[in-house]
Image: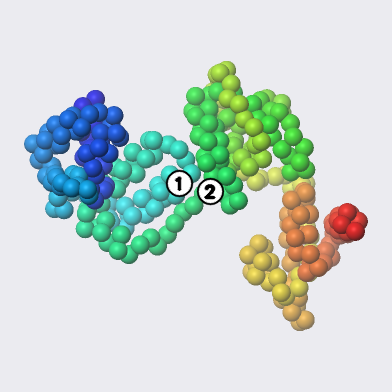
């Protein structure tokens, strides 16, 4: 235990400019007297630690000291730290915090100064927009722990149509896809693996029941994410007004967009036929016309009429 604490103190000092004695005592849950003895032991082992008195005082490892990192470059380490910070901002994981401390410890003091002076060039954020972040973090933490311990979870889940139902699921893992978090789990109601969007989980309760490990792996399920049978796709032809060209090219890709003589945009694309498709088309308002298939044009027209009736 003492060895782990000494290593932890060393790594923390390597990753930080200066750390106060009280902060170290609180972090490692020992007395100040123990911290002072630990600092002496680390110094005796050959790691040069300087102490500073006063309000901004504390302990600091001398600039010349660093851990040999062999083939990993400064840019490599900076990229790893950026990625870890992005995940750390969402996941409440002490192991990830410790890993970030260890990786940061491999960056020399002078390199850390370079980072501080230049500022960040890249920020990775996986917190969904317009959410209560702390509540979302709690939900992620509970589901991750349930997947790790193989505890059954009861979900109150809302469908895209707004209907809610209670499901008993066996969580397999979590994945960030596109702009949202998803839970991969075996659904006992459907007797098959399903994905559950976290933003649609209204309530969750972790059960003490432990389920047996199933053969499905998270990486295999993730590889199938978004795959559907050919029968669920339709080939559609849409005409857009030039004013929405940026949005159209962002969604469909410039290679699927044909610019006509009058400037309008013609798009031929295959897409799963579902409620999400209808909402996407309606989001363009009067800037889109459904040319094919006729059934899709009628469905969009019907929904538009119902919207008008509802708001008049």
* Image coords of residue 173 (percent x, y): 54, 34
Q: Where the N terminus falls, by quadrant?
A: top left
The front one of 231 and 91 is 91
Which class describes the residues within 10 Å of circle 1: few (<14), some (14-19), or many (20+)? Answer: some
Report the disc number at residue 127.
Answer: 2
- Most extreme residue toward the front is 55
Report the disc number at residue 234.
Answer: none
> What residue do we see at 40% from left, 47% from top?
84
Looking at the image, residue 89 sits to the left or right of residue 217; the answer is: left
Q: Quadrant of residue 162?
A: top right
Q: Are marks 1 and 2 in contact (CB under 8 Å)?
A: yes
Q: Tell me if residue 183 can be seen.
A: yes
The front one of 127 and 168 is 127
* Image coords of residue 40 (percent x, y): 11, 35
Looking at the image, residue 259 sits to the left or right of residue 211; the answer is: right
Which class describes the residues within 10 Å of circle 2: few (<14), some (14-19), or many (20+)? Answer: many
> What residue do we see at 88% from left, 54% from top?
310
Number of numbered labels in the structure image: 2
Mark 2: which secondary structure?
A: loop
Q: Quadrant of residue 267?
A: bottom right
Q: Quadrant of residue 163?
A: top right
Q: CA distance from mark 1 to mark 2?
A: 8 Å
> What residue do we see at 11% from left, 39% from top?
43
Mark found first going from the N terminus, 1 or 2: 1
Q: Which residue is mark 1?
A: 89
In this picture, is 280 found above or below 260? Answer: above
């Amino acid at each position: 235990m003492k060895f782990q604490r000494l290593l932890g103190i060393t790594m923390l000092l390597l990753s930080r400019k200066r750390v106060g004695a009280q902060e170290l005592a609180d972090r490692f849950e020992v007395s100040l007297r123990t911290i002072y003895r630990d600092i002496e032991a680390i110094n005796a082992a050959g790691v040069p630690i300087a102490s500073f008195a006063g309000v901004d005082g504390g302990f600091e490892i001398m600039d010349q000291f660093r851990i040999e990192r062999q083939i990993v470059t400064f840019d490599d380490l900076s990229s790893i730290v950026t990625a870890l910070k992005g995940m750390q901002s969402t996941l409440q994981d002490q192991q990830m915090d410790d890993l970030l401390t260890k990786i940061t410890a491999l960056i020399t003091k002078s390199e850390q100064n370079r980072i501080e002076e230049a500022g960040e060039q890249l920020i990775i954020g996986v917190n969904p927009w317009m959410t209560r972040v702390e509540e979302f973090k709690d939900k992620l933490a509970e589901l991750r722990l349930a997947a790790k311990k193989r505890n059954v979870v009861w979900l109150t889940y809302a469908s895209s149509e707004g209907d809610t139902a209670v499901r008993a699921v066996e969580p397999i893992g979590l994945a960030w896809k596109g702009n949202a978090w998803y839970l991969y789990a075996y659904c006992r109601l459907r007797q098959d693996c399903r994905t559950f969007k976290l933003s649609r989980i209204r309530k969750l309760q972790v059960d003490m029941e432990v389920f047996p490990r199933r053969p499905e792996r998270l990486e295999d399920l993730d590889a199938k994410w978004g795959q559907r049978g050919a029968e669920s796709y339709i080939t559609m032809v849409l005409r857009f007004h030039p004013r929405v060209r940026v949005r159209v090219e962002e969604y469909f890709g410039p290679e699927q967009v044909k610019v006509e003589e009058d400037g309008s945009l013609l798009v031929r694309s295959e897409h799963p036929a579902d409620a999400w498709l209808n909402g996407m088309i309606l989001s363009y308002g009067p800037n889109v016309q459904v040319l094919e298939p006729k059934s899709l044009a009628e469905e969009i027209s019907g929904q538009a009429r119902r919207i008008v009736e509802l708001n008049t």
